[in-house]
Structure formats: structure tokens, C-alpha cells
């Protein structure tokens, strides 16, 4: 199976400081891969490198969707990558864009619609919103939506271009518990309905890593601490090393993992019993 992402020996400096150190990492087509790490681990810089906004030192190799950086038009490449980030919420400006207008702006890579869409685009936008169970957001203004609903609209917007790769860059970071679960359910539905789509999910929360993400890695201080299958990576020892905490893991019946700090572990039995009903 072909690699959608191939990074070899990538070291990235920003403002004179090393942020990523000797990263080598591959993701195959159709994989669902998570990237876990604490604040400052290098997750955002890794995404910027994959998008061509940050460059590694000479001698590294970065290939995305089979195109090698340095020999490809990055603007054209980005049209095949869906990057969903909560930071996009800050770009809405003062316009009262509706969910429909935001979704239809996807092919133009603009925030908001500045032209008349074609009937085919209208049909596709409506279909995507329906598939994400977001029909009710079509005529709502984005400013009146919850953060979870806004991210759902951004996912539909990203899918308008038939992307080959989707990068979900800490999409739940600003959400409350209800909004986070709403979003994670959407991501699970997306993964199951688009088997051909390669999805990268970036997070600092262990419990956000859905069972659909079967492979992944942990970043710590700009280096890959662990990578491989979900079971190989998400171990208590790896997580203790990554977060410098005495972390214990509890597995819920739905396959999600929940972390408990060691000093609170005497309550873990009750917590585990509760998790079995989630």
C-alpha cells in the first residue's frame, strides 16, 4: 500500500530553536493515525511542515500524497488536503456567513462565499451536510453555532474538494464535554463512511483517541517517543514518559481509553465501573 505521508530525517528550527528533531514517519493510504503529545511537543510544527508552512533542514525528505517537497507546487497540493483546525474560527470576520455559504467556500479555499455556486456544488454541499447530520445548520449563521457545530461545518467544507488526506488539528481543544462528544461522534461517522480517506488526528487528550484510530505516535519535546499500532503506543509507561505523570489507563466498553492520575487511583475501581457503561 502506498504512503500518503513519508518523512525522513526531518529537523525543524523556528526562531533559532529546534522544534522537531530527526523525525522519520510514514502513513499509508486509508490509515487513521493519531498524534498525541503535551503542549510544546511539536505537534503544530509537524502539521505546518506537512502543509509546507515550515521547512526542515537540508537533507530531509518530505513527501505528501506522493509529491516531494521542493519539486511540487504547494498551493496545488494543499487543494488535496483537508486541514480542519479550531483556529479557523478566528477568520470569520464580521460577516454573518451561513453554514451553507461556509461549506460552499471550500473549493475556493476562502472563508465565506464570494461567488454564485454551481447547481452541482449546491447539491454536493447539501449532501455532505446531510451525511454529517447537519442539515439544520445550512441556514444558521456560523456565529450562532456552538464550537462543535462550527467544526462540523468546517469538516463538510473540507470534504467539498474530495480530499485525499484530512488533518484534524486538535479540533476539540476549545469544546466542552458535550461539544467534544458531539464532534468525536462525527469523526467516527466520517471514518466509517469514507474508508478511502486518510485521517490524521492530533490531540493532547488520551480519551479523544477513538478506536477507529488504529495507528499512531507520541511526540515528546520534538521527538518521536513511540510509534506503531494503537496497542503498542498507548501504554501506561509511554504515557507516563510523555506527560511526566503517574498515569493509569482504564478501557471503556466502547474501546476508548481514559487516564487516571496515580494519586487518584484508589477511586479507579469505581471509575472503571462507570466507564463500562459508556
Image: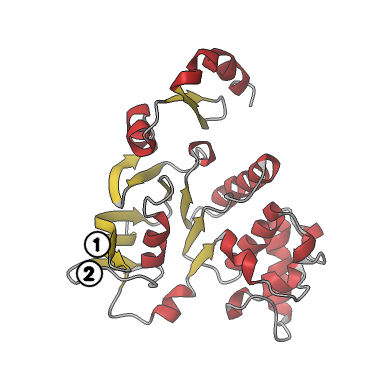
Viewer-side residue, 132 vs 87:
87
Q: Residues within 10 Å of mark 1 (few under 14, many from 20)?
A: many
Instruction: Answer above or below: position of 23 versus 228.
Output: below
Query: Which quadrant of the figure has residue 126?
Result: bottom right
x, y percent for residue 127:
71, 64
Tally of numbered discs? 2
Viewer-side residue, 189 vs 195:
189
- Tell me the element at label 2: loop
**Chain-order first, disc 2 or disc 1:** 1
Image quadrant for the N terminus?
Answer: bottom left
Q: How is the image coloured?
A: secondary structure
Q: Is residue 58 left or right of residue 254?
A: left
x, y percent for residue 23:
26, 56
Q: CA gap, disc 2 to disc 1? A: 6 Å
Q: Are marks 2 and 1 in contact (CB under 8 Å)?
A: yes
Judging by the rendered image, the residue that carries numbered circle 2 is 57
Image quadrant for the C terminus?
Answer: top right
Q: Residue at x 23, y 67 (%)?
A: 61
Residue that sits furthest to the front in the current view: 16
x, y percent for residue 144:
79, 61
- Tell me the element at label 1: strand
Q: Which mark is residue 139?
A: none
Instruction: Answer above or below: position of 60 versus 27.
Output: below
Viewer-side residue, 77 vs 148:
148
Judging by the rendered image, the residue that carries numbered circle 1 is 11
Q: Residue at x 39, y 57 (%)?
A: 29
Amino acid at each position: 500500500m502506498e504512503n500518503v505521508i513519508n518523512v525522513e530525517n526531518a529537523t525543524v528550527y523556528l526562531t533559532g530553536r529546534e522544534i522537531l528533531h530527526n523525525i522519520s514517519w510514514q502513513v499509508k493510504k486509508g490509515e487513521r493515525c493519531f498524534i498525541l503529545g503535551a503542549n510544546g511537543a511539536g505537534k503544530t510544527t509537524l502539521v505546518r511542515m506537512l502543509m509546507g508552512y515550515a521547512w526542515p533542514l537540508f537533507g530531509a525528505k518530505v513527501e505528501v500524497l506522493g509529491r516531494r517537497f521542493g519539486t511540487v507546487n504547494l498551493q496545488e497540493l494543499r487543494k488535496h488536503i483537508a486541514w480542519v483546525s479550531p483556529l479557523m474560527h478566528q477568520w470569520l470576520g464580521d460577516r454573518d456567513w451561513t453554514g451553507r455559504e461556509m461549506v460552499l467556500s471550500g473549493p475556493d479555499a476562502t472563508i465565506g462565499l464570494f461567488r454564485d455556486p454551481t447547481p452541482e456544488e449546491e447539491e454536493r454541499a447539501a449532501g455532505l451536510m446531510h451525511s454529517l447530520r447537519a442539515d439544520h445548520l445550512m441556514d444558521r449563521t456560523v456565529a450562532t453555532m456552538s464550537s462543535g457545530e462550527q467544526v462540523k461545518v468546517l469538516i463538510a467544507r473540507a470534504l467539498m474538494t474530495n480530499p485525499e488526506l484530512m488533518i484534524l488539528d486538535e479540533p476539540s481543544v476549545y469544546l466542552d464535554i458535550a461539544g467534544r462528544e458531539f464532534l468525536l461522534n462525527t469523526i467516527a461517522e466520517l471514518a466509517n463512511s469514507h474508508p478511502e480517506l486518510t485521517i490524521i488526528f492530533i490531540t493532547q487528550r488520551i480519551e479523544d483517541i477513538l478506536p477507529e484510530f488504529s495507528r499512531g505516535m507520541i511526540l515528546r519535546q520534538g521527538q518521536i517517543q513511540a510509534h506503531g499500532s494503537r496497542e503498542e503506543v498507548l501504554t501506561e509507561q509511554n504515557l507516563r514518559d510523555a506527560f511526566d505523570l503517574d498515569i493509569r489507563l482504564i478501557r471503556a466498553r466502547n474501546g476508548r481509553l481514559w487516564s487516571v492520575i496515580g494519586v487518584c487511583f484508589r477511586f479507579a475501581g469505581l471509575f472503571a465501573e462507570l466507564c463500562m457503561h459508556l
